[in-house]
Structures are given as structure tokens and as C-alpha cells.
Image: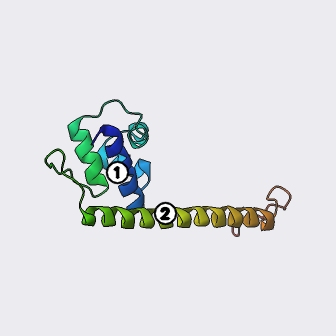
């Protein structure tokens, strides 16, 4: 497994944990920009302690296994389940983002222009 694959795994785990890159950065002590570069495979190097803290922030641990170990059926099924859950979560996030935008636009439309309305004096002020 290389650094780009570890970054992709971190991203999947972060999304499953419903965390933002900033939340992972805050919990791990790794700057958000480096989290982003790591997730996209654009980070050329990352120290081992930082890697461990990033994985811990999203609930992952590193495991060593002999080279050449082939994936088992359980590995393949687990990956398929993860991909399906991730896809479902991404659709939900997009749907919520669209709904949020629609609500903000509706609130803006219904909110009267504050500068056009007369200012009210506070009760009891002189």
C-alpha cells in the first residue's frame, strides 16, 4: 500500500465518520491543507506520527501484514459494503446541501429589507 492509497482510505473513513477535513485537522494536529493533499494523493511525504494521528482521528488503525497476502472474500465483501455506504452518504450530503440552499434563498426572499423598515426604539431607553 502506498501513501496515495492510505490517503484515499483516510478520506473514505472521514466521510463515514461524518467529519470535515477541518475537524480531522483539529483532532490530529495536522494542518487542514495537508489533510486535503494527503486525501488526494498529492502529498509527497507524511511522518509516521502524523499518519497515526490522522488515522486515529477517523477511527482507523494501521495493521502490518505480510507482502503478497491476497484479499479474501471477506475483504472484498467489506469493501463493497463500504463503497455502497459511502455512495449513499454522499447522495444524502448533496441532497441536504441542496435543501439548505433552497431554505436560505426562501428565507432571504421572505425577510424584509432591514434598512427600509423604520428603526424601533428600545423600551425603557431615554
Q: Residue 35: x percent and y percent? A: 39, 42
The residue tagged 1 is 9
Q: Residue 106: x percent and y percent? A: 75, 67
Question: Colour scheme in the image?
Answer: rainbow
Say which residue appears at 23% left-offset and 46% top-offset. 52
Q: Residue 125: x percent and y percent? A: 70, 64
Q: Which of 105 and 115 is in front in this view?
A: 105
Residue 62 drawn above or below residue 78: above
**Quadrant of image for the C terminus:** bottom right
Q: Residues within 10 Å of mark 1 (few under 14, many from 20)?
A: some
Say which residue appears at 42% left-offset and 48% top-offset. 22
Residue 93 drawn above or below residue 51: below
The residue tagged 2 is 87
Q: Which of 119 and 103 is in front in this view?
A: 103
**Spatial separation of the CA atoms under disc 1 and disc 2:** 14 Å
Residue 21 appearing in the image? yes
Amino acid at each position: 500500500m502506498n501513501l496515495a492509497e492510505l490517503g484515499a482510505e483516510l478520506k473514505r473513513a472521514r466521510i463515514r465518520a461524518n467529519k470535515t477535513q477541518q475537524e480531522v485537522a483539529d483532532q490530529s494536529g495536522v494542518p487542514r491543507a495537508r489533510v486535503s493533499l494527503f486525501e488526494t494523493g498529492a502529498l509527497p511525504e507524511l511522518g509516521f506520527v502524523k499518519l497515526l494521528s490522522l488515522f486515529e482521528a477517523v477511527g482507523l488503525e494501521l495493521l502490518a501484514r505480510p507482502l503478497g497476502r491476497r484479499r479474501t472474500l471477506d475483504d472484498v465483501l467489506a469493501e463493497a459494503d463500504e463503497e455502497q455506504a459511502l455512495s449513499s452518504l454522499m447522495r444524502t450530503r448533496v441532497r441536504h446541501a441542496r435543501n439548505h440552499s433552497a431554505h436560505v434563498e426562501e428565507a432571504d426572499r421572505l425577510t424584509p429589507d432591514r434598512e427600509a423598515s423604520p428603526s424601533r426604539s428600545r423600551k425603557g431607553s431615554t
